Amino acid sequence: MIVRTDRLTKRYTRFTALDACTLEVRRGEIFGLLGPNGAGKTTLLRLLLGFIRPTAGSAHVAGCDCEHDSLGVRRRTAYLPGEARLFRRMNGHGVLDFFSRLRPACRRDTAARVADRLGLDCTRQVGRMSTGMRQKLALAVVLATEAELVILDEPTANLDPTARAEVLDLVTEARAAGRTVIFSSHVLSEVETACDRVVILRAGRLVHEQSIEHLRRSHRISARLAGPFEGVPEALAAHVSLAEHRDDRVVLEAADSLPRLLGWLATLPLEEMQVEPVGLGAVYDRFHRGSNDAHGTI
Amino acid sequence: MWNTAIWRRAWGDQRALVLSLTALWGAFPWIYLWLSAQITMSAFQDVLLRAIPQEWQKLSGVPFAEVATPAGRVALAFVDPVIVLAATVWGITRGSDAVSGQLERGTMEMVLASPIRRTAVFVTQALAATGGAALLCGVLLVSVWTAVASGPWADRVEPARFVPAVANVFGLMVCLGGIASLVSAADSHRWRTIGIMCGFYVLSILAKLVGRLSTTFSWVGALSVLEVYEPQRLVGGGAEAWWLLARYDGVLLGIGIAAYVAGAVIFARRDLPAPL
């Protein structure tokens, strides 16, 4: 594990920004952080980097304590803030020079190459760049750093579709190079495309952990009942669950491959049956559409 | 404790202020001396001195008779708003930018995400600000020296007499820079840091005035850092001027360095809020 948090908590006078968050990030994976604004994603990232101190609990990155050895953490980490702001008087080249001098792991030529891939004109002064261009410049700095862990807080915000796709490619390349990426985003499709595993935060609490590989195998089966439904047989309980049963509508979620269920489904009095992949959106909606406390926390 | 990249960026940040104050302080002594030399004091010096209430003498810190001498008249340049306010502006702007300015702009975020100690960022910036102050005081000294040496009182005033006065200006810049950095280290908004510093400065002026004018509240003067900014007292020459400078700058530099140290400790330990 490259990241390990244990009941990590950050409490301010009036509210709890992060509440007893326990998670682990494996080496070499792309780990997604999901949640609406104020869910605690950025607080978690800032605690990992030692920008803020935990009220309770602990966090470790590559064996370094985030509170007491944040320098060790930052030696092993590259971080893109949610809204990267750079020195307005410098031009793009100046910014790349500055950060390559500031951190030896940031290679100047690699940064220039990443900037080029993102279609950035580095001769322009930062103060005259658009928000998207500044984001690209910050991404060039962060993705050129040969750090074990790359933390990206909303990396594709403000970017055009071409640059978004390029960023996702760069993230995937980072994983292929053996690096670990923590990817915080509101864009579910990107998270689903890029990540290996995601966690969902709500009001400072970690409420769900989801493997994307598992999600890709999962299907949602909705149908109208033309007769009595007696529930999921015990023999299949590990593979399918009843998500909804209201009047003559039934929704089942298959957590595994479908062929195993087809025989059983054929015996059911189902009409107008629809089978669709579950998708991250459906999982996210369980926790963030209306108040749904039934799912509790993991 | 030191970082070359931060040092270079800090100089880049303060370059415009250094250049403008260099132009101001390079030209001001020449203009000041030329204007002062236009007034022939000897003709109405005694009348003038008798006309000024003796109570006011307390404000000048030195007898009016000394002020009326060529050396005294040059020394008044050091308490002119052009010098005092420029020194104050330097201390407050550089100090307030140290932490809260960069937090407010959001530029601190990516710097501190790099493997660099917060104390290294703070100390390097403090050294750059102090280096800038030293450079500006060097400009001021050269300008005063050359203006005096080539001016109308060249044969009556020794330029070296003004070295302690310039050193006193340097002390004020370091002191205000340190205090502003301390406030900045604990704050997240530059406008608030500047507001606090302006309030502090106004209170210091008032405390100095009350201390000077009131016999009952003379102790209030000791609460003002400006009590030890008296460059006009340091132009007498000799060992006495240097001893007085050691006392004045001892206090100013002591407060400045203590404030920088306290600021570094606060900055190293505080939570850094996400930029708004």
Image (cartoon, grey):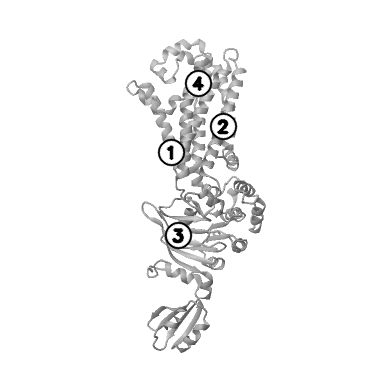
B267 vs B208, nearest the viewer:
B267
Q: Which labelled disc corresponds to residue B21?
A: 2
- Amino acid type, callout 1: Gly
Q: Which residue is mark 4?
A: B76
User: Where does residue A40 sit, x and y in percent of width and height?
Assistant: 44, 58
Tags 1 and 2 touching, CB below 8 Å? no
- Amino acid type, callout 3: Asn
Cα–Cα gap, marks 1 and 4: 28 Å
- The residue depicted at 40 percent of the width and 83 percent of the height is A231
Is residue A143 left or right of A263 when viewed as pictured? Answer: right
- The residue depicted at 42 percent of the width and 84 percent of the height is A233
Q: Is residue B260 above or below residue A33?
A: above
User: Where does residue A22 sit, x and y in percent of width and height?
Assistant: 44, 61
Tags 2 and 4 touching, CB below 8 Å? no
Specify the subunit that label 3 lies on.
A
- Circle 3 residues within 10 Å: few <14, some 14–19, many ≥20: few
Mark 3 or 1, which is nearer the eye? 3
The answer as to whether the residues below labels 1 and 2 share one chain is yes
Q: Which labelled disc corresponds to residue B108?
A: none
Mark earlier in primary sequence (1, 2): 2
Tags 4 and 3 touching, CB below 8 Å? no
Mark 3 or 2, which is nearer the eye? 3
Q: Which residue is mark 3?
A: A37
Q: Secondary structure at mark 1?
A: helix
Q: Is residue B198 above or below residue A185?
A: above
Specify the subunit that label 1 lies on.
B
Q: Secondary structure at mark 4?
A: helix
Mark earlier in primary sequence (2, 4): 2
